[in-house]
Image (spheres, helix red, strand yellow):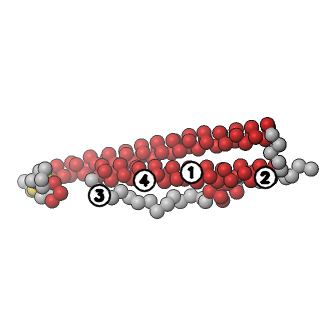
Amino acid sequence: MITIHHPSRELERPSIELGDLLEHALRDTKEWQHLVSDGFSGLSSDAEFELRMRTRALLAEHEAIINSTDPGPLAEADAALRERLVTEAEQAYWDLFQGANAVAERVAELLGSATPHQFAGLPVVAPAQLVAGLAPHRPERS
């Protein structure tokens, strides 16, 4: 029987048999794939729900302002709304980034890795550019 000595586990178990090592590796491989899949599915649905709720609240707030007061020139109201939408996009991106890091931490823990994968950033459109691509500004009322 072949025995592999693993330095990090010498205190808890003097040796690990090759069959055990292979069995653990195969189990962990299956588990991390499910962890990543479930983690990112949950992250996606949670982020989408949160963003929908925040933008609905933001739009309702701006509609109430427009309906109950004189919002001033529509271009100013539109600019204020767009500014808030940029802020919401930035928050959504931050939430996704944090969620992706949390999934990476869970995978690292499962695999016994000392450091999780580090995301340099998300490959996304900049928030200001994203909002600029929305429906064009309304023309001024005459």
Q: Position of residue 16 (x, y in %)?
A: 13, 53
- Pair 4/2: label in front: 2
Point 66% across, 50% down: residue = 85
Q: Rounded to the nearest whole Å, what is the CA distance between mark 3 and mark 1?
A: 29 Å
Q: Which mark is residue 101?
A: 4
Q: Amino acid at mark 3?
A: Ala
1 sits to left or right of 96: left
Q: Position of residue 68 (x, y in %)?
A: 79, 37
From the image, tell me which residue sits under label 2: 76
The answer to which of marks 3 and 1 sits earlier in the sequence is 1
Asked whether the residues under the numbered discs 3 and 2 touch, taking CB atoms below 8 Å apart as contact, a structural biologist would say: no
Asked whether the residues under the numbered discs 4 and 3 touch, taking CB atoms below 8 Å apart as contact, a structural biologist would say: no
From the image, tell me which residue sits under label 3: 114
Q: Which mark is residue 91?
A: 1
- Pair 1/2: label in front: 2
The answer to which of marks 1 and 2 sits earlier in the sequence is 2
